[in-house]
Amino acid sequence: MSGPRFLFMVAIVALAPGCRPASPDPPQKCSERDPAARGCEAPANEAPGDPDSSAAALRINCDAGHAPSCNDLGLRRMEGKHGPRDLAAALALFQRGCDARLAAACANLGAMHLRDKDGMVPDLARALAALTRACDGGDPSGCANLGTLYGTGAGVPLDYPRAISLFERGCTGGSAQACANLGQAHETGVAGQRDPALAAQYYERGCAAGSSDACAFLGGLYAQGRGVTANLERAFELIAKSCELGELNACSDLGIALLLGQGLTADPERGVRTLQKACDAGGARACNNLATVYVNGVGGVTVDVGEGLRLAVKACDLGEQRGCNLAQLLRGR
């Protein structure tokens, strides 16, 4: 039995339930501890819609103890909106929001402690603490990521029943990734009996809520006719949606399908574009597949062994062993 592919949420976008990104106008209750705290008033010279004044208002409100403002400002620093990207500042702002008991900020803090890129080193102990606070506070994305820790044994003992319980809480609360992971649990059987039909239901929920993984997993079920009636057209609709949502392996599969006319009308030009875009974004499988396309002239594409070698080397550099093998083969010609 192949193991489940439980995934972390990679995008940190959660806000407190009912909270919108703070506007230049401060909330009526700037601080739950002291609603009349100094600094709750907005700067007198701010202009509505001015990014700088909006950030200044968030900073004033955050300094006055308004946790959602700390969270929103942290999101801006993390994403590089309205100013330079600053992950260290984002981490500190999420910490302040979490310390003020805002579950969304704890979820964002935990997710940042899981990052293994952009110069950040994962800290599983801190991630566990923050995500536990987030989930206990009712944040569904916190429950999703906490479930993944238990479902993969990352920093905690492997505990499938606990992971599944956390995924259920997250999915019920609206976390698309929790629904995707819950579907994986039922598809692979770690939740008990394998149940692809039930998995498909969770994938549907996750895909509708924006999980690229759920769309890809559901597309796989439709392609294989497991738990649902086999339907290649529907399968590639879902794979295309997964690609649009940023799943690079789905883009690779879509590109090949377009080249070969599998489940949809053949469009080699679009297929090459789809593969190239995914490869440019760092998709190792897409680079390898595009290399094969150029070497073999798949779909009527003009053979270009030199381009195929370049792409195979790139796929290899990105960790795709098949790219390494292809590059070695081409160099030996």
Image (cartoon, grey):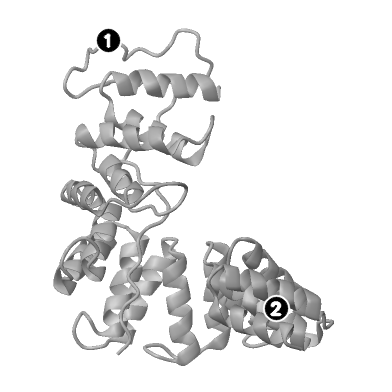
Figure quadrant of the N terminus? bottom left
Q: Position of residue 40 (x, y in %)?
A: 31, 15
Residue in view at x 52 percent, y 37 percent: 80
Percent position of residue 55, x then y: 46, 24
Dot 2: few (<14), some (14–19), or many (≥20) neighbours within 10 Å? many
Task: Tell me if residue 305 comes above or below residue 59 in the rendering.
Answer: below
The amino acid at mark 1 is Arg
Mark 1 vs 2, N-terminal side: 1
**How many discs appear?**
2
Image spot of residue 309 (x, y percent): 73, 77
Q: Determine the CA span between mark 1 and mark 2.
A: 62 Å
Q: Is residue 19 left or right of residue 295?
A: left
Q: What residue is at 54 percent from the left and 29 percent from the top?
A: 83
Indicate the quadrant containing the C terminus: top left, top right, bottom left or bottom right. bottom right
> Mark 1 Cα within 10 Å, few/some/many (few <14, many 20+)?
some
Q: Which residue is denoted by mark 1 in the rendering?
A: 38
As drawn, the label of residue 291 is 2
- The vertical placement of 240 against 53, above or below, is below
Q: Position of residue 142 (x, y in %)?
A: 26, 53
Which of label 1 and label 2 is nearer to you?
Answer: 2
Image quadrant assignment for residue 31: top left
Please tell me the numbered disc located at residue 80.
none
Pick the front one: 172 or 134: 134
> Is residue 248 found left or right of 111 in the rendered image?
right
Tag 2: amino acid: Ala
